Each structure stands twice: as structure tokens, then as C-alpha cells.
Amino acid sequence: MKQFGGPVLYLDRADINTDEIIPAKYLTEITKEDLKPYILEDLKLPGFDPKGEKTRSARVIVSRANFGCGSSREHAPWVFEVNGITAVIAESFARIFRQNMFNCGMAAIELPKEKIDLLFSFDNCPDTAIGIDVEKQTLTISGGGRKEIITFDVSPFDKALVLAGGWVDYADQKY
């Protein structure tokens, strides 16, 4: 079964769009793997390096509201997938981006602002990681000697997509 979670990349801004996640000039690449080096290439945040160790080691992204807005493209979840990122946690998502995450077998977890703020309070704590149990709909964040457990909601169908590994695997199992 697919594991969700690991080291966290904090992107402290709302409205991160799909052009910042994967620039449009790379949409002609032939395979998902070809997208890998361009993850978050056009995202501008103070101190953020898309080629840095935090980005390379991340398995979970924590961000603010309206994550994945802009052009609807599956390439945005794909670039996360090929870089080992299994989940994005935010206050809200653009509808199409969120569904593309589920369709690709990745978790898109929406939490209220106060829970997102709690997750951000772990930024810069040593060894911060988030473990996600999609089945039980819980996430556990730990770092700097602290630990918190947070529950989240996801529709039964979207949960089934994620647990199956995405839409294609779900369809193979069901039809």
C-alpha cells in the first residue's frame, strides 16, 4: 500500500498557481519523469529554492488557500508525483487541481486556517515530518520534540481513489 507523508515543504502563500508549480513551457515533455527537474521553478518566495534540499526531500507540502489555481493541467500533480510528494495540505484548493490530485492517487487535504497555522508553527523545527493515514483520515505532525494529531475530511469516493492509487487503478479494480 502506498505510504503518505514524510518531510514537509512549507510554502507560506495563498494562490500558488499551476504555472508556478510547473511552468507551461514544459508541458510538451513526453513523460512525467521529464517534468521532474522543473518542480516549482517559477515560484517566488523569500528564501525558497526550488532546487534546494528542502524541495528535494519533501514528501508533503503545506500551504495556504486556493492552492493549484490557474490553468487546469494534470502536469501539476504529475510533477509532485515524480518528485515523491504524496500529499498537499492547504486551507483550500482550486477544484480541478484537487480532483487531479485524487485522480493521480495523491492526497489533497483541506484544513481550516487555525489547523494550517498549527502546521506552520512546526516550520523550522528539527526533523519535522507529517504522517498521513488516509484510511483513518488523520495526520500526525512531529518535530522539535512536539507532536500533534489532526483529523481531516475526505469524501468516500475521493478516499477510494487515493487508496486505490488513482483513477486508473480504481477503475481496474472495480470494472
Image (spheres, rainbow, N blue to C red):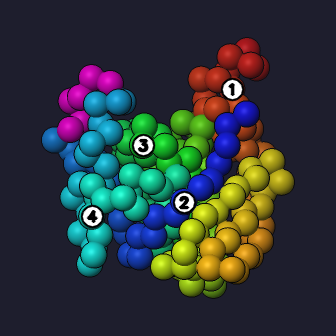
> As rendered, which of 135 and 56 lies closer to the eye?
56
Disc 2 residue type (three-letter): Pro
**Disc 4 to disc 3, C-alpha distance:** 15 Å
**Disc 4 to disc 2, C-alpha distance:** 16 Å
Badge 2 is on which residue?
Answer: 7
**Disc 2 to disc 1, C-alpha distance:** 27 Å
**Disc 1 to disc 3, C-alpha distance:** 22 Å
> As rendered, which of 86 and 147 lies closer to the eye?
147
What residue do we see at 78% from left, 57% from top? Answer: 137
**Disc 4 to disc 1, C-alpha distance:** 36 Å
The crowd level at tag 4 (other Cα within 10 Å; few <14, some 14-19, many 20+) is some
Q: Is residue 77 magenta?
A: no
Badge 4 is on which residue?
Answer: 49
Residue 143 position in % (x across, y down): 63, 74
Is disc 4 placed on a helix, strand or loop? loop
> As rendered, which of 73 and 163 lies closer to the eye?
163
Q: If you read the primary sequence from the N terminus, does the residue marked by circle 2 or circle 1 appear first?
A: 2
What residue do we see at 40% from left, 62% from top? Answer: 54
Query: Does residue 127 sit above or below 166 in this rendering?
Result: below
Residue 163 position in % (x across, y down): 72, 38
**Disc 3 to disc 2, C-alpha distance:** 13 Å
Q: Nearer the viewer, mark 1 or mark 3?
A: 3
Badge 3 is on which residue?
Answer: 83
Q: Is residue 88 left or right of residue 72?
A: right
What residue do we see at 52% from left, 52% from top? Answer: 59
Q: Locate the C terminus by quadrant.
A: top right
Q: Is residue 23 left or right of residue 1?
A: left
Magenta highlight range: 26-31
Badge 1 is on which residue?
Answer: 170
Disc 4 residue type (three-letter): Asp
